[in-house]
Amino acid sequence: MLTGSDLLAKVKELGEVSKSDLVRACGYVSTKKNGGERLNFTSFYEALLEAKGVNLGDKGSTSIGKGGRKLSYIATVQGNGNLLIGKAYTALLDLKAGDEFEIKFRGKQIRLLPNEDS
């Protein structure tokens, strides 16, 4: 994945290509578990903004929620027993629908590890 001045140069070089072709040419592509191609537009645009000098701030204090709320990094068990992480957190990790995790327990801690088989 291109970043900084390399990313800006590539964007300028490619000129008027489609957004998909631009993201692909700059290397912001990953592989889905079914073998298909996933274009990572969010990562591309974040890198492009940073390359242009727009400071997105520290990932730990990113405002992603509605109204620019800061992430609290605290989750609460809901009345039905579910533990909801939320879209803002999955966006920080560039997670997509269908991504799988292995659940590990250590004492009263829960760890989510990306499933390498998917």
Image (cartoon, rainbow, N blue to C red):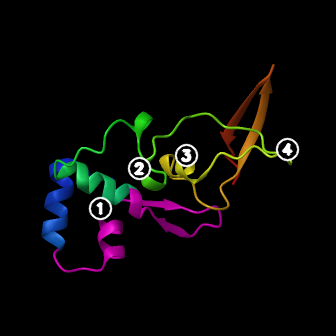
- Tag on residue 81? 4
Separation of residues labelled 4 and 3 (CA atoms) = 20 Å
Q: Residues within 10 Å of mark 2 (few under 14, many from 20)?
A: few
Point out the tag, 3 or 1, that comes first from the N-terminus: 1
Task: Determine contact: label 2, label 1, CB under 8 Å.
Answer: no
Q: Nearer the viewer, mark 4 or mark 1?
A: 4
Name the foreground residue: 93 vs 117.
93
Q: Which secondary structure, mark 2?
A: helix
The residue beneath circle 2 is 68
Amino acid type, label 4: Gly
Percent of width and height locating residue 92: 48, 47
Question: Could you say whether the residue bearing mark 3 is in a helix, strand or loop?
Answer: helix
Query: From the viewer's perspective, is the residue at label 2 or at label 3 nearer?
Result: 2
The C terminus - image quarter: bottom right
- Asked if the residue at tag 3 contacts the one at tag 4, i.e. Cβ–Cβ closer than 8 Å, the answer is no
Q: Residue furthest right?
A: 80
Q: Earlier in the sequence, mark 2 or mark 3?
A: 2
- The image quadrant that residue 48 belongs to is bottom left
Outermost residue on the top side: it is 107
Closer to the N terminus: mark 4 or mark 2?
2
**CA–CA distance in space, label 4 to label 2:** 28 Å
Contact? badges 3 and 1 (CB < 8 Å): no
Of tags 4 and 2, the one toward the viewer is 2
The span from disc 2 to disc 3 (Cα, nearest Å) is 14 Å
Residue assigned mark 1: 26
**Residue 44 image position (x, y, % from top left):** 34, 58
Towards the viewer: 102 or 42: 42
Mark 3, residue position: 89
The residue positioned 16% from the left and 58% from the top of the image is 8
Density class for disc 1 (Cα within 10 Å; few <14, some 14-19, many ≥20) is some
Q: Is residue 3 left or right of residue 95?
A: left
Q: What's drawn in magenta, residue-wise? A: 15-42
